[in-house]
Image (cartoon, coloured by chain):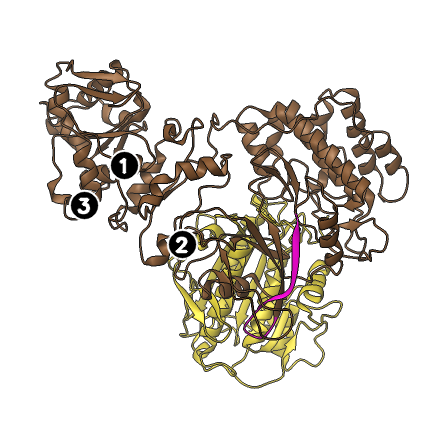
Chain colours: A brown, B yellow
């Protein structure tokens, strides 16, 4: 069995290109597939990939090389284990029977050759742009939209029933083999365990036993997929979705990468904590009958003998009368709580690194929106890579989410390594007129905390707080104030050092996202330049407040310095000595 | 159910601890290769790390599904031998951290990239007893903290005999490791003996009959029986000939055999968790 390392190394050695071999002989196709690169610093670059026990999958395209930030349109699946012998039947089934939940694919036997001459089969499939079911549920739950999952459950139910009707038995339904596309559609992927109930097809008699977080304990790899197995796993997912829809708190039973909420022990016995919680929920009659059917299945030791099918026929397979059959609603793009803080990473290097990564695929934006949003990257070789949390549909209005500025920490970490972003073009500069300054309400203020504090004697944290209050009183958003302090500022404000603080005001402020401290022996200037520029690359307006001109860094970081120069607000000019400058006007439009 | 079937997941990660003999004799040239035994052992272990990293890939992310430990024993001490990747409080390091490794070699012979994480050393004595004792607590704490995980996999790679104990005490000492367990089974103790010189290899035998000497028998006894779920993986996925009752043990293995054994040893059952075509 080939290893994932062998397959990935082959693709890396070919510079993320894959030339498909002819199944016989030495020839290969002249036109390669381009594999989507992964972020990171490996040289040669590594592919974006998913991996499991039996296959590795790469997003790819034949039409473009990802240099310009395009999206994949194909998924190449390389089989590490034995390719199920009935795959050609499956692919011909797929091309003859269309169902919106199925993804077409072509099998290319022996398409890759490894060093020792070993050949690997490859399946080319259409790329599904969306979420795996677990990621989707996670987002929906975090968004407080879990009630929508009842609709998703019904779409799954309809899909499974329709596919059974067609004779397509997906033998490995799971959180990761069901995807919710960005258009809201439900797709099934990974057809290794599919049983085709179609005349003339030789289905295997044994194979993979499916994911045991979703399968009945009696399923063994000696028993290839049976209808009962499909219904059992579908019920596990169906009941999970309805239960979470009623009680989002059940998501605590989710084990990342492994399940939705049921664990093998919950499929062995209904006397578990999870089941007690589910039993306390009240479902309408039809869903209740499905819950009962699942419990019945769990109660019997052998799924394919006995009355399980009858229970299904009387509940899940009946379907139809539930009025919730609507496409699942996409989660709003503004989660209340982001599961992960935005990450920011600055990378530059030799040619390959100039590939701009695709935007984060888990964001439910259309291709068009994504392309539009990334215009600036097309201008140059923008290399600031980051996870952007979008607010609002128009990318131009996109803003970093909420109050969390932990991405700044990422920039600080990268500071040492990061060379300047010379090649990136800067969004057009805003000329600063000294008399009237019209700034957008969403403007970020990156502040030179040390410079501001030291403008007033004695040095005290309150100076900074007063300035925050001032800006806030003008209508700006405090969540967008990012003050960066030199490491020694905290000592300058202490009364013992002649400072004006009374207690631990500085520490208190430091504990908020509004103040960040540069590491010892590093001037905050560089961080200020970097952070302001990073924010601007997100498309958000940003001003830098300081009396300093940072000329020391002009040579070293010309692009960042140019951005600074164009967006510099002189602290003493706008704040004076705490006389409110009437010339600043808050506007929804920037001029 | 204690049948070695639990899938590795973020909440129920696996645990693989390597004990690597880095005594002076490991510096000897390894037959069939251009390098020393110590280099070969490091390369085999690093290859496994690289493979596990890829197996845990989920798009841009690496799922923290495996905790790993690397202990080299040489002279009179047992040392963490992945210098750039310090262990956490539990004495282990997550696969997610190991995925950050930028140092890699291209193995020209097989044309694969191998992250270089475990260093290659060869110096002094063979304090095997101390190594086994050292990892005992770490594995024990892991099992207590992860009662429903696949049990810890403890892999000892050596070319020689312990210098800090009577070799006949090995089976008893190994018992203390095998007594560590999770709900999915007892810890699996692997002993893989490699040899610089020519000699017939015994790979995963099911009895100690016909082994080269007494020491080999002690190592055999100190090794766990290979659980059925892993026998199946070996037979089906890696086309290995494995008899019923096979032990997690090899004697006189060469470089290729070591790698194959480590691949099997580290392939804890993995439900088909393909992210498929996204």
Element class at badge 2: loop
Q: Which mark is residue B86?
A: 2
Left or right, residue B135 beside residue A317: left
Same-chain check, marks 3 and 1: yes
Residue at 77% x, 42% y is A230
Q: From the top left corner, tell me how far across and down residue A308 is, in percent.
A: 86, 37
Disc 2 crowd rating (10 Å Cα; few below 14, some 14-19, many 20+) is some
Q: Which residue bears the numbered disc 3?
A: A558
Same-chain check, marks 3 and 2: no
Q: From the top left corner, tell me how far across and down residue B103 is, in percent.
A: 38, 62
Same-chain check, marks 2 and 1: no
Q: Which residues are magenta?
A: A104-118
Foreground residue, A520 or B53?
Answer: B53
Number of dots carrying numbers: 3
Query: Mark 1 and mark 3 in contact (Cβ < 8 Å)?
Result: no
Foreground residue, A168 or A31?
Answer: A31
Q: Main secondary structure of the magenta part?
A: strand
Alpha carbons under labels 2 and 1: distance apart: 42 Å
Q: Of the two numbered discs 3 and 1 on the same chain, state the one appearing first in sequence.
A: 1
Alpha carbons under labels 3 and 1: distance apart: 15 Å
Q: From the top left corner, tell me how far across and down residue A550 is, in percent.
A: 13, 39
Query: Mark 2 and mark 3 in contact (Cβ < 8 Å)?
Result: no
Q: Which mark is residue A427?
A: 1
- Tell me the mark number nearer the camera, choosing from 3 and 1: 1
Q: Quadrant of the N terminus of chain A?
A: bottom right
Q: Chain of mark 2?
A: B
């Amino acid at each position: 069995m080939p290893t994932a390392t062998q397959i990935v190394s082959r693709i890396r050695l070919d510079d993320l290109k894959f030339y498909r071999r002819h199944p016989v002989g030495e020839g290969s196709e002249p036109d390669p597939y381009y594999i989507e690169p992964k972020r990171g610093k490996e040289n040669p670059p590594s592919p974006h990939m998913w991996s499991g026990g039996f296959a590795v999958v790469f997003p790819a395209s034949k039409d473009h090389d990802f240099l310009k930030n395009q999206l994949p349109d194909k998924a190449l699946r390389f089989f590490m284990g034995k390719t199920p012998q009935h795959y050609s039947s499956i692919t011909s089934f797929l091309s003859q029977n269309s169902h919106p939940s199925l993804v077409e694919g072509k099998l290319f036997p022996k398409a890759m050759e490894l060093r020792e001459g070993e050949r690997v089969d490859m399946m080319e499939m259409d790329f599904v742009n969306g979420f795996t079911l677990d990621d989707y549920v996670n987002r929906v739950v975090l968004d407080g939209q879990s009630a929508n999952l009842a609709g998703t459950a019904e779409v799954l139910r309809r899909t499974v029933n329709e596919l059974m009707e067609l004779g397509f038995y997906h033998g490995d339904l799971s959180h990761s083999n069901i995807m919710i596309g960005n258009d809201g559609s439900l797709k099934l992927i990974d057809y290794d365990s599919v049983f085709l109930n179609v005349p003339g097809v030789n289905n295997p008699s044994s194979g993979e036993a499916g994911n045991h977080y979703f399968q009945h304990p009696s399923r063994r790899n000696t028993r290839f997929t049976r209808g009962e197995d499909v219904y059992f796993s579908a019920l596990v997912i169906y009941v999970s979705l309805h239960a979470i829809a009623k009680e989002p708190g059940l998501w605590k039973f989710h084990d990342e990468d492994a399940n939705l909420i049921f664990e093998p022990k919950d499929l062995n016995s209904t006397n578990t904590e999870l089941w007690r919680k589910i039993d306390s929920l009240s479902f309408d009659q039809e869903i209740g009958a499905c819950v009962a059917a699942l419990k019945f299945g769990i109660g019997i030791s052998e799924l394919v003998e006995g009355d399980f099918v009858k229970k299904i026929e009387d509940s899940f397979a009946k379907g139809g009368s539930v009025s919730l059959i609507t496409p699942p609603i996409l989660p709003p793009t503004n989660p209340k709580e982001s599961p992960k803080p935005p990450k920011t990473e600055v990378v530059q290097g030799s040619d390959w690194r100039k590939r701009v990564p695709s935007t984060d695929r888990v964001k439910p934006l259309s291709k068009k929106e994504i392309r539009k949003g990334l215009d600036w990257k097309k201008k140059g070789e923008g290399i600031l890579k980051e996870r952007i949390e979008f607010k609002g549909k128009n990318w131009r209005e996109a803003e970093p989410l909420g109050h969390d500025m932990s991405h700044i920490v990422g920039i600080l970490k990268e500071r040492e390594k990061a060379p300047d972003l010379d090649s990136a073009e800067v969004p057009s500069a805003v000329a600063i007129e000294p008399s009237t300054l019209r700034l957008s309400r969403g403007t970020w203020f990156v502040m030179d905390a040390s410079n501001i504090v030291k403008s007033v004697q004695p040095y005290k944290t309150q100076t900074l707080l007063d300035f925050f209050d001032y800006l806030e009183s003008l209508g700006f958003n405090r969540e967008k104030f990012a003050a960066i302090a030199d490491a020694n500022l905290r000592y300058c404000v202490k009364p013992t050092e002649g400072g004006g603080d009374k207690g631990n005001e500085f520490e208190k402020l430091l504990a908020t996202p509004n103040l960040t401290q540069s590491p010892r022996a590093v001037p905050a200037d560089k961080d200020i330049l970097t952070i302001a520029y990073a924010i601007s690359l997100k498309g958000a307006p940003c001003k830098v407040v300081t009396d300093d001109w940072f000329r020391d860094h002009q040579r070293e970081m010309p692009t960042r310095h140019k951005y600074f120069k164009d967006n510099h607000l002189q602290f003493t000019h706008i704040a004076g000595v705490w006389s409110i400058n009437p010339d600043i006007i808050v506007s929804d439009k920037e001029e | 159910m204690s049948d070695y079937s639990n899938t590795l997941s973020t909440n129920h990660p696996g645990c693989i601890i390597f004990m690597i003999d880095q005594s002076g004799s490991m510096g000897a040239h390894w037959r069939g290769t251009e390098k020393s035994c110590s280099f070969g052992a490091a390369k085999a272990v690093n290859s496994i790390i690289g493979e596990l990293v890829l197996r845990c890939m989920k798009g841009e992310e690496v799922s923290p599904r495996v905790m790993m430990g690397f202990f080299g024993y040489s002279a009179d001490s047992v040392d963490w031998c992945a210098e750039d990747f310090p262990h956490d409080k539990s004495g282990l390091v997550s696969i997610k951290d190991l995925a950050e490794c930028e140092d890699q070699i291209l193995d020209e012979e097989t044309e694969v990239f191998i992250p270089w994480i475990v260093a290659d050393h060869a110096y002094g004595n063979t304090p095997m007893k101390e190594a086994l004792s050292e990892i005992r607590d770490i594995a024990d704490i892991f099992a207590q903290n992860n009662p429903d995980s696949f049990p810890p996999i403890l892999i000892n790679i050596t070319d020689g005999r312990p210098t800090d104990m009577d070799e006949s005490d090995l089976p008893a000492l190994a018992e203390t490791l095998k007594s560590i367990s999770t709900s999915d089974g007892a810890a699996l103790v692997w002993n893989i003996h490699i040899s610089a010189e020519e000699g017939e290899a015994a790979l995963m035998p099911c009895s100690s009959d016909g082994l080269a000497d007494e020491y080999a028998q002690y190592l055999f006894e100190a090794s766990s029986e290979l659980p059925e779920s892993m026998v199946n993986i070996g037979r089906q996925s890696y086309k290995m000939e494995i008899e019923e009752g096979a032990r997690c043990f090899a004697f006189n293995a060469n470089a290729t055999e070591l790698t194959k054994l480590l691949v099997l040893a580290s392939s804890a059952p993995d439900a088909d968790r393909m992210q498929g075509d996204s």
